[in-house]
Amino acid sequence: MTTMTAARTAARVVDAVKVYGAGDTAVRALDGVCVDFPAGRFTAIMGPSGSGKSTLMHCAAGLDTLTSGSAWIGGTDLSSLDDRRLTLLRRDRVGFVFQAFNLVPTLTVAENITLPLDLAGTRGDQEWIDALIDVVGLRDRLHHRPAELSGGQQQRVAVARAFAGRPDVVFADEPTGNLDSRSGEEVLGLLGRTVRHTARTVVMVTHDPVAAAHADEVVFLADGRLVDRMESPTPERILDRMKALEVPS
Amino acid sequence: MNASVRLSLASLRAHRRRFAGTFLAVFLGVAFLAGTLVMGDTLRASFDSLFGNATSGTDAVVRSADAITTPGEAQGVRQPVDTALVRKLEAVPGVAAAAPNIQGAGQLVGANGKPIGGQGPPTLAGNWITDPELNPYRLAEGRAPRASGEVVVNRGAAEKGGLHLGDTTTLRTPDPVRVTIVGLATFGGEDGMAQVTFTGMTRSDAEKYLTARPGQAASIQVRAAPGVSQRDLVDRLTPVLPKGVEAITGQESAQENTDAISARFLSVFTALLLVFSGVALLVATFSIHNTFAIVVAQRTRENALLRALGAARRQVAASTLAEATVVAVTASAAGLAGGIGIAAGLQALFPAIGFPFPDGNLVIGALSLLLPLAVGIVVCVASALMPAVRAGRTAPLAALRETSVDTSGASRTRAVTGAGLLALAVSLTLTGVLLSPSLWLAGCGAALALAAFVVLGPVASTTAVRLLGAPLDRLRGVTGGLARRNALRSPKRTAATASALMIGVAVVSLFTVFGASLKATMDQTVSRSFAGDVAVSTPSFGAGGSGLSPALAPAVQRLPDVETAVGLGRGVAEVDGRGRALTVTDPAALARTFDLGDVQGDLRTLGTDGIAITRKEADRQDLTLGATTRLTFTDGSTKPFTVRALYDQSELAGDYVITRAAWAPHRTQDADTLVAVTFRDGVSTADGRAAVEKVAAHYGNPDVQTRSEYAQSSAGGIDMMLTLVYALLALAVVIALLGIANTLTLAVHERTRELGLLRAVGQTRAQLRAMVRWESVLVAAFGTAGGLGLGAFLGWVLVKASDGASDSAFAFALPPARLAVVALVGLTAGALAGLRPARRAARMDVLRAIATE
């Protein structure tokens, strides 16, 4: 099964270039990156600060636009979409987990989970959502407000929301950055399990080797370029690779 | 510069946008106030100079000393003086010239057959004084009247009626007189004395049409010989005057005229405008308070840091107050300039709409400069006081918390205090209205009710928004649901924002309800006491119009279709030491056309020495049937009258009725105010009306109206007043609207991250805009609902209190259609207020929003 889905690509960028600013102060955040994120896999993007890993994620997810090159979700070229179509694409085909402030404070846990579906005006797959709620273990918290939950619980709600609409791909931006190690472990385990048990695709940006080790594969970025890919990572191997990156040869 | 001030200036520079709403609210309130004051002073001064110019040639005015003033009249009715006195005065050394001034009511009919003026300012007619120095009017074109039927008309009136030199038209005195315009005149250099119309006729015409008997004049104008001062002249004249006649200087007379205009028109006008600028500033208070409260809340972190770094409470509070002061001073100063600008604009506008306004400079007194400035600054700084104190109380370790649901404001203490206040307010008003009628008690209750609504706002907002927003979830899905919850987020803020609109809407509905009640009262009065089929009247308002010819009623009576036609004239006399309006009519016919209620005695036997009185007046003066009361007339004579009948209904018939025969010896210029007509059985209203109209056409073409038309036209002035009030209240609604927009803008700013999140997970721009707009509409709906409730209650209080405090009965009416329009305007205001914040929110960049700290 894994091999079958791995043949498809959930998201990819081709010759991605992103330049901030202009003239002398121009910064090339992405400098010709080509990378694809296979469907049904958990991929981590790693790199030192300023390596362009967040920019890569934002552009791949349709939150930001490339200066040149192209970004694809499934078979859709994001550069061909206007703001409204991009929004609808995010709503229907992409899930997000941010580092913090993931939830709308006025909505209950249950409402936060179904928010993208509600915005689309659809009911979604109730069985799937039910199963998700059990997987993230928040059945007894459904009618609570985000402010009544711990940080770890809030991130688990965000994970459930990200998967609620069965998106092509879920992007996670430092999802454990604000959590203690035990809560972080829980959230990462949750992401990994969901990918493996339900054949979903996750792309996660992180700077933490321990977090990245939960992924099936790690891609390394430095100075806006893709420098390496690593299958079946362990924290030690990642750490070694990162050290090599931070001391430019 | 001290640290607090430096901080607040820096903050103002950084957040100019946030204070735009506050600035505008103060600016508008102050501009309105300043404009009102400058306008009032300028108008007063220009009337002063107008009269001064016009009457500068008159050094003394001789007139009868006593005036009888009836309640509700500014200037009393004076007995005329004998024109034979002119000769005697001319013989006094130091007198250069003397001329009688005969004055009465005379309304011109314009080229289109419609009467000119009559909607407030007087419509005057008089003799054209041949001595140009003594005549306040100057010939601008044509010549003075020489033959009977020739007249001079002030230019403003001629222009309004489309009349030109050589035109022939009708002058209602009220007997219709055919007149030919031979001259056009100006007053003090202007086209007229404001909107007053004047027709000057030959002296013999004036005596014939405007006075009861020839040889009478309202006053005698006297000019002094060179070298004789006004005071000197008066001193020389006084010894030759008969008893009851006095001389005053020309200056005193001009002053009296200006004062009369001030009392009758300017003070009312200015007072009305001041009340509305008060309402606008009250509404502004809420907007300003809200802005500062939000800004302080948003700056909690910054203030906590300042406190941690060692800033004292006082310093933190002072920096917020300093900000408020800067905004207050700049906005008030700008408002002051704006207000003077408004006054200048109006001065330019008035002549354009046909209201002669002397050119002179704007009069800007010290009060008009200082009061608006002081009020603006005090309102703004006082509104910011509480938020500033709260800023000072920020704990140094204030948690860096996420903006979330704020439940403050719904505390039990507030609920209990509010409920207590409301209970007290209601019981006070009810006592003031029902038990012991007292406007004072009712007024206190009304003010307390307003306070109670403001205190209860945050408690009520949760329930109200939930209720009002319930349909939104179903209609607008998650967008509506989010809007509703956003409106519920901070009950205190929602309530404060809505309070501003609530006050505006409450005042609007108060006037709407009161106006409708007045109309209903008129309607009730007419349907209850007017038993006739049609009414003939000249619709007029205030001092204008000339009434109906006394010959009209007998002429109508002669029609075969008519059963009874009765004319009601108006007389004035002093009864029991007070000026009273008398109804002069045929009492027997009166009883057939009007329902006078239970009549005791016989109205047919009044004769020349009998009087009919309402039971209420009789009780007040301890008069019974057969008792005698003394009436003093304007000619100075006092006559005993026997009470021959008592009746109940006074609304149209008045409190005192005497016969025409009894009035004849004391009459001045005769006019009927109303002719009531009853048709014979079998005559249709349409036929009868056509017949009456044919007759009326020969008497200056007054309006012939059915009962319901008559009731409606009696209430015509009310609609005019309401329109003016609505126009003035629009300002308060605009300020409230600015408040809502400002609060929303700040809220959007505060929720940047959350909005970014919503956009990231798939909310479209359109959905985001709709969400912000609906929140705005919900807040407005809450304010509007509260305002309608409060306004309807206060309207009821006002009607009931007026009912208790005055003689006539007031009816209470709720106009559903008009109130629905008010509600719609409130909601539309909300939708409009949400437009800009919604656009701004939607324009936000998703990535930057997510990254916002």
Image (cartoon, coloured by chain):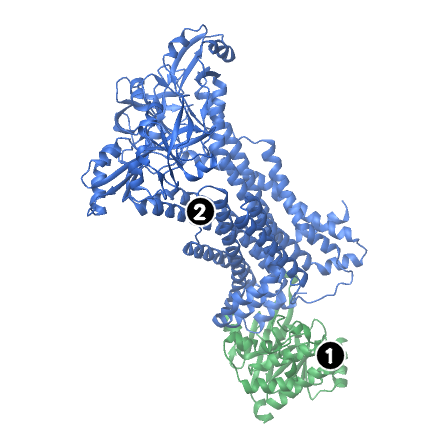
The quadrant the N terminus of chain A occupies is: bottom right
Between B262 and B567, the one nearer to me in the picture: B567
Q: Is residue A101 visible?
A: yes
Output the letter for the chain in blue.
B
Quadrant of the rendered structure where residue B137 is?
Answer: top left
Q: Amino acid at mark 2?
A: Phe
What number is the disc on residue A208?
A: 1
Q: Amino acid at mark 1?
A: Asp
Between B77 and B247, the one nearer to me in the picture: B77
Q: Residue lying furthest front in this view?
A: B626
Total residue callouts: 2
Which residue lies under the disc numbered 2?
B810
| Chain where mark 1 sits | A
The quadrant the C terminus of chain A occupies is: bottom right
Q: Residues within 10 Å of mark 1 (few under 14, many from 20)?
A: some
Residue visible at 77% across and 56% down in the picture: B306
Secondary element type, mark 2: loop
Quadrant of the rendered structure where residue B689 is?
Answer: top left
Q: CA distance from mark 1 to mark 2?
A: 81 Å
Residue visible at 78% across and 53% down in the picture: B313
What number is the disc on residue B652?
A: none
Q: Colour of chain A?
A: green
Left or right: residue B595 compared with residue A11: left
Q: Residues within 10 Å of mark 2 (few under 14, many from 20)?
A: many
